[in-house]
Each structure stands twice: as structure tokens, then as C-alpha cells.
Image (tube, rainbow, N blue to C red):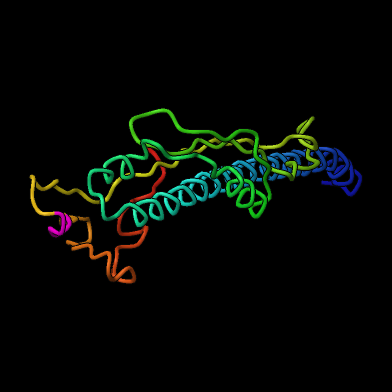
Amino acid sequence: MTRSSRSADAGQAFPIYIMVVAGLLFLALAYLAVGQAGANRNGAQTAADAAALAAALDTRDQLTDEWTRIVRDPTKWQAVFHATDAVFNGCGRADQLAAQNNARRLGCGRADGLLPGYTVRVETTNAVGDSIVPGTENLHAKATATAVIEPACTFELPGAGPADAPLPTLSCDDGEWHPDPEHPADLPGPEDLFDVHLAD
């Protein structure tokens, strides 16, 4: 093979080399854009989960305070454990947790279903950013989460008896409690009375 033919072959291969490199670069940028979008979606879901849980925990604490207030009247316990008369005003806490996770709240309200709780929808404050995919510079991921408040204790109301009869025993997930209003520091706490978790 002469020097001139080798030079010709090299000249012909160079454009192919450039095309291959450009193709690989395009694929790398495409994978990067997909990764950015995935990270943005994961961030949105994390923010929604945290916001919904924060709202539910806020209401759980209010329910515990209400139970402590009416602990001497076990006929009112059931309404507290099932949040029958609860005021669902925990969306302020949802806002705080969404903001801490670089998101803003789009919606927040009482969850549908048998268990009380919150459904929260958020949008990330950071866009996916510039990429080879058109429009991603203004694309914000959205996500929705629901957290519920489930009673962790059961009890049986006593029959007719003296006014100073012992209060019912609480059979809770972590054991039994014998509430004594004379020792409020020994009463079960929010985490003992209620289980807060994300809905399936």
C-alpha cells in the first residue's frame, strides 16, 4: 500500500470517527438529561412524603393533647382515636417540610379513605435545567403523597361503676398502659397512641 492510499484511507475514516464521537456525546447528554429528570422526580416525591407526614404528625400531636385533656372521661376517647372532631390544620407544617426539601405545595387537604390523614401535592422549586431535551429548562417535577393517622391502641369501656373506678387499660402496639390522670408525666405519648405512616 502506497503512502498516498494510506492517506486517502485516513481521510475517509476521519469523518466516520467524528460522527461516532458526536453520536456517543449525544447519547451521554441524553442519559444525563434522563438522570436529571429522574433525580428531580425523586426529589419531588421525597418532598411530598415529608410534607404529608409532617401534616399528619402535627394533627396527631393535637389529638394527643385532646386525649390528655379528656382522659378522665373514657366515653370520649373513641372520638379522639378516630379523629372524629379533629381540626385538620396541619398544612402549615406541610409547607415548611416541602420548602426544606426544595419544593412548594400545590395542594393539601384531608385524605379520602377510612383513616384520617392528609394528601399533599408538591412541585419542585428547581427545574430540571438545560439539556438536549427541549423544554426541560422550565420543567418542574410534581408528586403526591398521602399520610394517615392510625390508632395504635384499643380499649374496652367499663360498665356502670363508681365514679372513681380505674380508667380502661389501653392495649397498644408497644404494650399496655394504665392511664393515671394524677401522674400526667406517665401518660402515653403521641407515638404510643397513634401510628402515622404513608398510605400504600
13 or 194, which is in the foreground? Answer: 194
Comparing 50 with 173, the one in front is 173
Q: In the picture shown, does residue 168 fall above or below 111?
A: below
Residue furthest to the top in view is 112
Dividing the picture into quarters, in which one does residue 175 lie? bottom left
On whether residue 165 falls in the magenta region, the answer is yes
Query: What is the magenta segment's predominant secondary structure?
Result: loop
The boundaries of the magenta stretch are 163-167
- Residue at position x 39%, y 51% from top? 66
Horizontally, is 140 left or right of 71 in the view? right
Report whether 162 appears left or right of 114: left
Q: Position of residue 159 (x, y in %)?
A: 8, 45
In the image, residue 34 lies in the stretch drawn in magenta: no
Q: At 74% across and 34% down in the image, what residue appears?
A: 139
Q: Quadrant of the C terminus?
A: top left
Estimate the x, y position of residue 30 in percent, counting from the top left.
70, 39
As drawn, is 126 to the left or to the right of 176? right
Tell which of 48 and 153 is nearer to you.
153
The answer to which quarter of the image holds residue 80 is top left
Q: Give the vertical position of 162 relative to 42 (above or below).
A: below
Residue 31, above or below 153 = above
Lateral position of residue 8 relative to residue 170, left or right = right
Residue reaching furthest front?
A: 163
x and y percent of residue 186 in the render? 29, 70
Query: How many marks can you see?
Result: 0
Q: Position of residue 123 (x, y in %)?
A: 66, 38
